Image (tube, coloured by chain):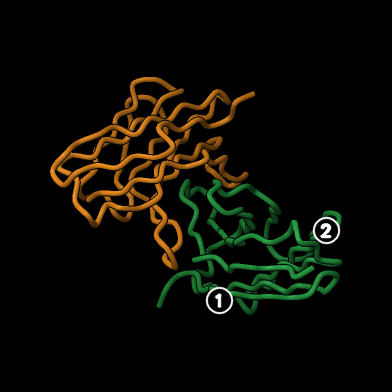
Chain colours: A green, B orange
Amino acid sequence: QKEVEQDPGPLSVPEGAIVSLNCTYSNSAFQYFMWYRQYSRKGPELLMYTYSSGNKEDGRFTAQVDKSSKYISLFIRDSQPSDSATYLCAMANFGNEKLTFGTGTRLTIIP
Amino acid sequence: NAGVTQTPKFRILKIGQSMTLQCTQDMNHNYMYWYRQDPGMGLKLIYYSVGAGITDKGEVPNGYNVSRSTTEDFPLRLELAAPSQTSVYFCASSYPGGTNGYTFGSGTRLTVV
């Protein structure tokens, strides 16, 4: 079993829809949770960062962490064609300098 | 502010050739990392470094070598290139602990033929 599982997609939704991206994990020691966005032929860029459980909102993006279920989500409201990218979840436990990444979900927003 | 700079952006190697992928960061980050990304496989850690003079193996180190003589530079050396090393290589850097997130370079697309 992989430490971090992420549905690779691809996921296609119409413009304006709410998008839900998810990851599950098996290591209960993970405390730091991140979402990266990667455009085609570019490096990943940090999109959202949360510590422990709860929600964090930044504009149209909301990151949610449920440590009891070992499940994290990224919601995108009012999705735009510019949101078309691959989204990678990543996580780490305190004191560990290495992030563990999911395989990424490829998202396409259809105008 | 350049962030993390990788060179070259593209390279074609013949089997058995060697090359060095360059990575430089100007954020004074202590930690640096090399990943490879293959389609559908996510990011796999090759090597990482927590400071100048200190390096350690990641998940897939075979066929690669690194050095870290300065805080800014973290080159990745490929010896005796093989087709299995065809991939996109990303360098990243972070503050100690990495839990504030990594800054990635734009990648080097390598093909071994």
Q: Residues within 10 Å of mark 1 (few under 14, many from 20)?
A: some
Camera-side residue of B80 and A71 = B80
Instruction: Residue B68: name its quadrant.
Output: top left
Reply above or below: B63 against A56. above
User: Can you give x and y, in whole percent of width and height, for residue B109 in the image?
Assistant: 40, 45
Circle 2 chain: A
Specify whether A47 is left or right of B16: right
Specify whether A81 is left or right of B18: right
Circle 1 chain: A
Pointer 1 or 2: first along the chain = 1
Q: Which residue is mark 2?
A: A57
Reply above or below: B32 against A110. above
Instruction: Residue B17: name its quadrant.
Output: top left
- Quarter of the rendering occupied by the N terminus of chain B: top right
Residue at image location 56% in from the left, 35% down from the top: B95
Camera-side residue of A36 and B101 = A36
Residue at image location 50% in from the left, 60% down from the top: A101
Residues at marks 1 and 2, CA–CA distance in whole angstroms? 23 Å
Residue at image location 39% in from the left, 59% down from the top: B38
User: Can you give x and y, in whole percent of width and height, for residue A103 in the image?
Assistant: 49, 66
Q: Which residue is mark 1?
A: A7
Say which element carries label 2.
strand
Q: Callout 1, which amino acid? A: Asp
Say which element carries label 1.
loop
Q: Callout 2, which amino acid? A: Glu
